[in-house]
Image (cartoon, coloured by chain):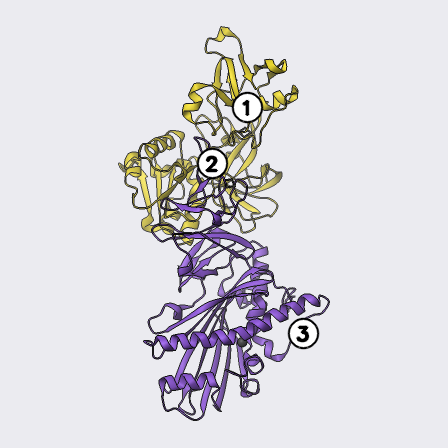
Chain colours: A yellow, B purple
């Protein structure tokens, strides 16, 4: 189900590493047996970058029945933050630190029909979904978008399995994707669930078109790795006059954690910006509120009247001389 | 092949595979008007249909505070609304509306079970949904074939599902349990043949030649041959399909007219369709029907046969419930086997293999694996 268990880290051993296109590499590793990795799952991997250790998420392309053998595909990014360079350097026998398969992009049974939409390396997150929809005899289309065929991984495998259900959209062959018609052409008579994975720009275009056609937002599924705000996390001050409390929220701590450490008894549950239990009223703010939750609507966020303290933060005012961010709350 | 250790084969409370299709309801029981609740393989489900008639099976407990969705209402084209605080879910079990706020928590959902309509039943898959291949639904094609007519019922049986499979795989009990309708001494006197087939099914075949027809069969013969009198050749050919479906080819023909050579024209033929769905460890939904391939136009015969089998199965139900009570009252006593248990023991061994594969996380067994050929090679 959706309530993802906490990541549990183990050591895994690379058993195969080979290129599938110029820039995409397939890495298979073995880890302790558990359960088969479900479609839509990913693993977090500890990568070494020039800036030190960091964590990256990679979608699972293939899993053995007991989940002991997992395959991911990694694109060497042009503006890499170092993760893909590390992954591309792995050779058979190397050890990596990774989590169990984690789920936040679950394929659900019960939709009238399905559309799988993948662009570029986004194919890795949905390839297993396609296999399952095929096996279950579901009504689906598999739309795969790329710049050129040479850069598109797994095309032959997909064509062999999906036949006519596969639609290749290749920019340099003049068949690139028209987002507007993709959404407009979905049948109105029944519902379609869309599972998409690709560049943010494309997913955002689909999302906007989806909403403009008044389609139910629950039917559009995509994965965002981690809640990324508009600004890099930075330290800011917080104050609750009623409690006579004032403290600093460090860049690697949440507002909720800082307030609790300072002795405030705050209400919360999910700590993922979903439930809204931690919503608190803002009485004043210096700087910009970086709303990182999915509880408040866009309209509510625009007013800056409240924020969800488990994930949201304050960024310094645009005018760099005005000092760090500062937040005053009312209970 | 070396001898396998079958730990669960003679278990008294037999576990059930989850990676399997189970009949959950007759097609007409599930509607787009009212949700209904049913527990399958230990999982309570709410069942309903969308306005375009697709069946839906969701967990019968709201994501929020677990109120039963089956007490809620159907709204829109495919949604169900929780009776407590009004959360709404679509047919994939995703929450689509939280009345007290502008947004919807993307994590809010309830499990959605694969469900397929076939052979007049709805079938659900309570296990790993990624393995739910509709081709694995057992063959009950007589239920929807134009060459067969008939009807059936559901028994809510207070016993482990395996006890019902045991009951159906050995019909010598007819002499003792169903003496008034079906029983005759020749049942236990005649030989039978048990075979594990290449497709993973199990067949138990019994022929009784030149016997007096028992009351049930004499009446059926007279429906087709009004002046019939005399001896018959009688057959019972039991077909088991994993995990828990048993279709029994039954009938009688005028003695010596070649029914055992394939010419059944001088007889009457029925199919007893049984599919048993574990509800809990100690209760089962037992769906049955009696199909016939003669006098298809007669509702009188359909009703008479259904009522007749209803009476017969009522006798089984009494025995099964009493057997379950005795099993529970005697926890230190084991099961022992007789020669007549061959069919039931093959069923147990096949289920044991399915359970072991499920534990290893493997795909539902192919026919090859069920016959043990695959197991020997592994
Ligand atoms: S604790 Fe749930 S939104 Fe903050
Ligand atoms: S329990 Fe269902 S909405 Fe609260
Ligand atoms: Fe019986």
Q: Which is in the foreground here, disc 3 or disc 1? A: 1
Name the residue that disc number 3 marks: B336
Mark 1 residue's CB less than 8 Å from ligand 1 = yes
User: Nearest the camera: A263 or B14?
Assistant: A263
N-terminal of the pair, mark 3 or mark 2, is 2
Look at the numbered disc 2 and give the secondary structure of its residue: loop
Left or right of A192, for residue A84: right
Name the residue that disc number 2 marks: B106
Look at the numbered disc 1 and give the secondary structure of its residue: loop
Label 3 chain ID: B
Q: Alpha carbon of mark 3 to alpha carbon of mark 1: how far?
A: 65 Å
Label 1 chain ID: A
Instruction: Return the x and y of residue B40 as percentages of the image width and height.
Output: 52, 57
Instruction: Return the x and y of residue A54 as percentages of the image width and height.
Output: 56, 28
Name the residue that disc number 1 marks: A309
Residue A234 disc label:
none
């Amino acid at each position: 189900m959706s309530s993802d268990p906490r990541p549990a880290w183990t050591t895994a051993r690379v058993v195969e590493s080979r290129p599938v296109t110029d820039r995409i590499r397939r890495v298979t590793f073995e880890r302790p047996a558990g359960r088969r990795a479900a479609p839509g799952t990913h693993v977090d991997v500890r990568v070494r970058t020039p800036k030190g250790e960091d964590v990256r998420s990679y979608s699972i392309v293939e899993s053995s029945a007991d989940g002991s053998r997992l395959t991911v595909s990694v694109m060497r990014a042009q503006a890499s933050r170092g993760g893909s360079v590390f992954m591309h350097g792995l050779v058979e026998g190397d050890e990596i630190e990774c989590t169990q398969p984690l789920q936040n992009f679950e394929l659900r049974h019960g939709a009238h029909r399905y559309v799988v939409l993948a662009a570029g390396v986004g194919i890795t997150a949905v390839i297993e979904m396609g296999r399952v929809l095929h096996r279950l005899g579901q009504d689906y289309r598999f739309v795969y978008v790329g710049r050129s065929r040479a850069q598109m991984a797994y095309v032959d495998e997909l064509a062999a399995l999906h036949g006519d259900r596969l639609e290749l959209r290749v920019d340099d062959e003049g068949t690139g994707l028209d987002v507007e018609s993709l959404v407009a052409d979905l049948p109105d008579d029944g519902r379609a669930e869309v599972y998409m994975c690709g560049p943010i720009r494309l997913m955002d275009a689909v999302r906007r078109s989806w909403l403009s056609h008044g389609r139910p937002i629950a039917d559009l599924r995509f994965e965002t790795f981690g809640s990324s705000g508009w600004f890099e996390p930075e330290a800011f001050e917080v104050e609750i006059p009623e409690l006579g409390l004032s403290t600093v929220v460090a860049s690697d701590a949440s507002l909720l954690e800082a307030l609790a450490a300072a002795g405030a008894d705050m209400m919360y549950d999910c700590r993922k910006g979903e439930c809204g239990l931690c919503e608190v009223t803002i009485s004043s703010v210096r700087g910009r509120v970086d709303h990182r939750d999915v509880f408040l609507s866009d309209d509510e966020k625009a007013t800056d009247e409240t924020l969800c303290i488990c994930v949201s933060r304050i960024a310094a005012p645009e005018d760099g001389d005005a000092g760090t961010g500062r937040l005053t709350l009312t209970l | 092949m070396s001898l396998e250790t079958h730990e669960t084969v003679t278990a008294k409370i037999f576990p059930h595979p989850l990676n399997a299709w189970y009949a959950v309801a007759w097609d007409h029981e599930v509607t787009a008007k009212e949700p209904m609740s049913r527990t399958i393989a230990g999982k309570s489900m709410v069942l309903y249909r969308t306005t375009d008639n697709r069946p839906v099976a969701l967990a019968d407990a709201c994501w929020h505070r677990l109120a039963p969705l089956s007490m809620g209402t159907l709204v829109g084209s495919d949604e169900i609304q929780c009776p407590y605080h009004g959360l709404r879910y679509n047919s994939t079990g995703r929450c689509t509306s939280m009345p007290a706020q502008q947004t919807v928590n993307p994590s809010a959902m309830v499990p959605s079970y694969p469900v397929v309509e076939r052979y007049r039943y709805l079938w659900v898959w309570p296990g790993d949904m990624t393995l739910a291949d509709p081709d694995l639904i057992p063959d009950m094609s007589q239920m929807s074939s134009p060459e067969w007519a008939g009807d059936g019922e559901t028994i809510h049986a207070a016993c482990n599902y395996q006890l019902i499979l045991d009951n159906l795989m050995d019909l010598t009990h007819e002499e003792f349990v169903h003496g008034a309708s079906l029983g005759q001494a020749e049942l236990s006197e005649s030989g039978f043949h048990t075979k594990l087939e290449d497709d993973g099914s199990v067949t138990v075949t019994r022929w009784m030649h030149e016997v007096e027809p028992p009351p049930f069969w004499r009446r059926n013969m007279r429906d087709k041959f009004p002046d019939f009198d005399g001896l018959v050749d009688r057959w019972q050919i039991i077909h088991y399909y994993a995990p828990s479906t048993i279709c029994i080819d039954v009938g009688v023909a005028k003695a010596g007219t070649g029914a055992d050579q394939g010419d059944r024209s001088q007889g009457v033929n029925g199919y007893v369709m049984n599919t048993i769905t574990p509800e809990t460890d100690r209760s089962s939904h037992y769906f049955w029907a009696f199909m016939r391939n003669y006098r298809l136009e007669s509702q009188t015969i359909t009703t008479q046969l259904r009522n007749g089998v209803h009476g017969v199965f009522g006798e089984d139900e009494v025995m099964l419930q009493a057997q379950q009570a005795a099993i529970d009252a005697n926890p230190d006593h084991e099961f022992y086997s007789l020669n007549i248990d061959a069919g039931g023991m093959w069923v147990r061994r096949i289920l044991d293999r399915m359970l072991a594969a499920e534990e290893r996380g493997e795909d539902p067994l192919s026919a090859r694996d069920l016959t043990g050929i695959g197991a020997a090679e592994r």
